[in-house]
Amino acid sequence: MSKTSKVRGLISREVQSKIDFTGLYGDCFIICCVIKNLFGEEGRSLFHETSSFYPNYCSELTDNFYSSLKNKNYLYNSDELFKIAAKYGVSESIIISISFHAFFKGVCKSCTRGIKKAATCTCNCLISICGPNWA
């Protein structure tokens, strides 16, 4: 799985869980650098997504912050982003598992609901790396 896919998966998981990874300025700065290094201008919307759960989120300030960083000027990589996520209980293995299963159809044994993407199941059977409910 590519770094960009892992980062997109992490941000998707953050949004799904409504977790704020950007509460500390240092973490916010690193997250912004990683997204900007990996995605350039296309990462702006991802940075808005990851910042949106900050209690004092402001679209204009977030946009200005993203614009202020120059591409590739900071040497942070995606590993730093996953270290930040781990502080909030989101591990890389969960992201990889969800991303992997999102490509397959399956049935959750708990709610017996046929689903196209594992991440759409309403019984939260994927919380512990797909858990015992996923088939």
Image (cartoon, helix red, strand yellow):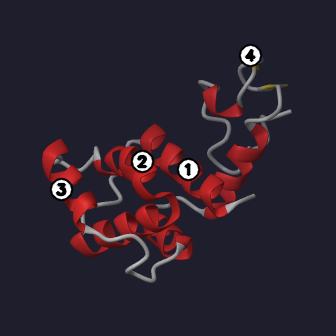
Pair 3/2: label in front: 3
The image quarter in which residue 59 lies:
top left
Query: Which amino acid does the dot numbered 2 rest on?
Result: Leu
The residue that mark 4 highlights is 113
**For the residues bearing labels 1 and 2, Cβ distance under 8 angstroms:** yes
Q: Quadrant of the C terminus?
A: top right
Q: Earlier in the sequence, mark 3 or mark 1?
A: 1
Query: Which amino acid does the dot numbered 4 rest on?
Result: Arg
The residue that mark 2 highlights is 46
The image quarter in which residue 113 lies:
top right
Q: Earlier in the sequence, mark 1 or mark 4?
A: 1
Residue 30 percent coordinates (x, y): 36, 72
**Mark-to-mark CA distance, 1 and 2:** 8 Å
Q: Going 70% across and 45% down the picture, which residue do you hit?
A: 99
Can you name the residue that lies furthest to the bottom here?
75
**Mark-to-mark CA distance, 1 and 4:** 26 Å
- State the mark number for residue 8: 1
For mark 4, give the secondary structure. Answer: loop
Q: Going 64% across and 53% down the picture, which residue do you hit?
A: 5
Q: Going 27% across and 75% down the picture, which residue do you hit?
A: 26
**Mark-to-mark CA distance, 3 and 2:** 14 Å
For mark 1, give the secondary structure. Answer: helix
In the image, is residue 109 above or below residue 82?
A: above
Q: Earlier in the sequence, mark 2 or mark 4?
A: 2
Q: Earlier in the sequence, mark 1 or mark 2?
A: 1
